[in-house]
Image: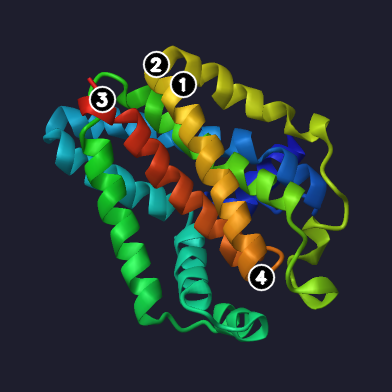
Amino acid sequence: MNAFIASLQFITAIPLGKPRPFDPKGIIVHFPLAGLAIGLIVALFDLIVSALWPPFLASVLDVVLLATITGAFHLDGLADAADGLYGQREREKALAIMKDSRVGAMGLVAVVCVLLTKAVALGCVEHLRFLALMVVPAYARSAMMVGMRFLPYARGREGTGNPFFETPLSSMDFKFVAAPLILSLFLGWRGLLLNLFFAVTTTALIFIYRKKLGGITGDMLGAMVEIIEVVLFLAVCARGGS
């Protein structure tokens, strides 16, 4: 439980009492369960707002809550990654831009596009909303594990994220990914589409990151979360999501 709570404390702004012991490996391994908890909160919230307002407005409120729960942690990473990776910049220049706290034009455009697409896609989901809202955040946090497994830390030992890359992940460390995988089966054929989109998008992002920087950073992991969420909501709302 300490590792699970520590994982939630690391990737959310949910007040959960005193900080748990810092265990990088434990935090990473519990990312899928932390994502599932985030999704459950949003799904329960959606039941309330959907009873009061139309689906599209409820979806906007869901996306706002999702950003609030995470403290815009991943959105900040998306903005920084978009600023740094856009164009043909040299590796060190891209890393320097991502470290800059200021948000550039490309970062702002990326955040706006992601939020708009996420809200509209979720607005198309009707009967599967509760399950989709649970599964998608869990898969998106699982993507960070894949990024950490197959890419080295781009900033080296001096980077603040280095402790999370010191111990390589094994196949057994992905055991909690089974939770969203099993739940996705209840989405029917859209669950199969969701898993296909997850595999293709995650693989594509890893390929792009490797080509751009030869590694990954915390900002790029945050960007993975946001991009995966958008793609998976699009998968679930395929053909109206009814």
Q: Residue at x 39, y 28 (%)?
A: 132
Residue 102 versus residue 14 in the image, above or below: below
Q: Earlier in the sequence, mark 2 or mark 3?
A: 2
Identified by mark 4, the residue type is Leu
Position of residue 7 measured from the top left corner of the image (x, y, whole percent)? 67, 46
Residue under label 2? 189
Position of residue 14 measured from the top left corner of the image (x, y, whole percent)? 52, 49
Asked if marks 4 and 1 touch (Cβ < 8 Å), the reply is: no
Identified by mark 1, the residue type is Leu
Is residue 16 visible in the rendered image? The answer is no
4 and 125: which is toward the camera: 125
Identified by mark 2, the residue type is Trp
Find numbered disc 1 in the image and state the secondary structure of the residue it sits on. helix
10 Å crowding of disc 1: few (<14), some (14-19), many (20+): some
Asked if marks 3 and 1 touch (Cβ < 8 Å), the reply is: no
Give the color scheme: rainbow, by chain, secondary structure or one colour. rainbow
Residue 95 versus residue 142 in the image, above or below: below
43 and 108: which is toward the camera: 108
Residue under label 4? 213
Report how far apart the C-alphas of labels 4 and 3 lie in the structure: 37 Å
The reply, left or right, for residue 156 in relation to residue 182 is: right
Q: Which mark is residue 172?
A: none
Q: Which mark is residue 192?
A: 1
Q: Residue at x 42, y 80 (%)?
A: 103
Closer mark to the observer between disc 4 and disc 3: 4
Residue under label 3? 241
Find numbered disc 4 in the image and state the secondary structure of the residue it sits on. loop
Find numbered disc 3 in the image and state the secondary structure of the residue it sits on. loop
Report how far apart the C-alphas of labels 4 and 2 lie in the structure: 36 Å
